[in-house]
Image (cartoon, rainbow, N blue to C red):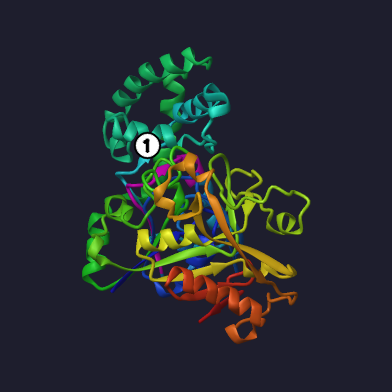
Amino acid sequence: MSVTAVIGSQWGDEGKGKAVDYLAGQMDYVARFNGGNNAGHTVINEFGTFKIHLVPSGIFAQNTVGLIGGGVVIDPQVLIDEIEMLNKAGVNIDGRFWVSRRAHLIMPYHKILDGLYEEAKGAGATGTTRRGIGPVYADKVSYNGIRWTDFASDIFESRLQMQLTLKNKIIVALGGEALKYEEVRAAYRGYYEKLKPYIRELFDVVQNGLKENKNFLLEQAMGTFLDTDWGTYPFVTASTTIPSAASAGLGIPPRHITRVIGVTKAYTTRVGSGPLPTEIKDYESEAYKKFGEVAATTGRIRRVGWLDLEIVRTAVQLSGVTEICLTKLDILSGLDEIQVCAGYAINGKSIRYADVDAYGLSEVELVYKTVKGWSEDISKARSFDELPANAQNYVKMIEEAAEVPVKWIGVGPERDATIRR
């Protein structure tokens, strides 16, 4: 039995979807334990190209069972759309995909309030995805949430009436239009009927799997530095993103998590507001144009920067990363020189990420070093020895800084465009 957690060591968008899809063939269970459809994982395999937000990215391995734990918040329509997408692509999930009845639902008022709050903050906006993630987690911890288990009786109706009474007052006060009870009730009862075959209690599923020495792959949403406690607060997500969240969000005892894979992009990106220390501000530079990406969830252009080794090092220590999966190394091809942030300083004195808050992080002195790039196209490489010497040195530099081995290297978006060491 093994429990492997896959986490992003930066601000999300590291390529966790590809990593999970690649590893899932060795697993009995693949599971989501945190976040919601604010996460976006892109998977390219023999079934096609998919942008997944809720269903675990490992669902394409036909021998696996996909789980969505109670720590995940669910937009029912998004989940229905993903199930239909998978069915249309020929991915059969009947009898091997389950959703915890403890999961909280994203309601229409959560999405409305998410947008109204951002607009009210003006220049101080957090930069949320406006998918209702923050408001639904706020309701969860303030005893105002609605869960799938509420639909088994008329509890759903009574809770919905109470919440609409409260939320409509806030919506109207902020300039929005009040929601109608009957319309919301009918829509969500309809969602429940469609998803009811997949909803069950997962406690015995997980515990029996552990007893039977099954292999679990835990798929983190977001990235380490969007964690509510350890991220760049307040420019973070609403859930805990480090592996410990799997204990509450799925029911996996901490002692069973023995392997943590830190997915690390060969450079750094971030969507939305908040500090990005190594951000490239020269929009005409070759590096900026090479690193430019569009976020899978929001469609927003990602901010880009050079690799930040202090961020990676901190993520490794915080989550107990045992090995690294390095992604998008191929994007660096063609750069003569590559800048890498080796550490931070204040007034010439070395500091760590944990020594400053999000606002202080914007003011730290960055200790850069320049490494030699390579011109060769490495997208066809399938062994470490096939990489140019400077590309090999780049990988070794990351290993030395993080003090854990780089076991996988992504040289393209496809599943097989991976070097296994």
Q: Is residue 320 above or below residue 356?
A: below
Left or right of residue 411, residue 71 in this image = left
Expressed as whole percent of the image width and height from the top left, the position of residue 297 reads: 57, 46
Is 111 located above or below residue 195 in the figure?
A: above
Residue 197 left/right relative to 325: left
The single residue placed furthest to the bottom in the displayed view is 385
Q: What x and y, as percent, mark residue 182?
A: 43, 21
Name the residue: 31% across, 45% down: 101
- The quadrant where residue 393 appears: bottom right
Question: Residue 107 occupies which quadrant of the picture?
Answer: top left
- Residue 152 belongs to the span the image colors magenta: no
When the figure is inspected, residue 15 is found, relative to residue 406, above or below; the finding is above
Residue 379, x across and y down, in percent = 68, 75
The foreground one among 240 and 348 is: 348
Q: Residues within 10 Å of mark 1 (few under 14, many from 20)?
A: many
Residue for point 52% across, 63% down: 264
Residue 68 is inside the magenta segment: yes
Identify the residue position indicated by label 1 in the image.
137
Name the residue nearer the viewer: 315 or 112.
315
Say if residue 272 shows up in the picture: yes
Magenta region, residue range? 64-79
Residue sitting at x 78%, y 51%: 284
Q: Kindly indicate the quadrant of the structure image that contains residue 50.
A: bottom right
Quadrant containing the N terminus is: bottom left
Rendered view: 119 above or below 322: above
Judge left or right: residue 65 versus residue 410.
left
Task: Say which element carries label 1.
Answer: helix
| Residue type, numbered disc 1 | Tyr
The answer to whether residue 62 of the structure is visible from this angle is no
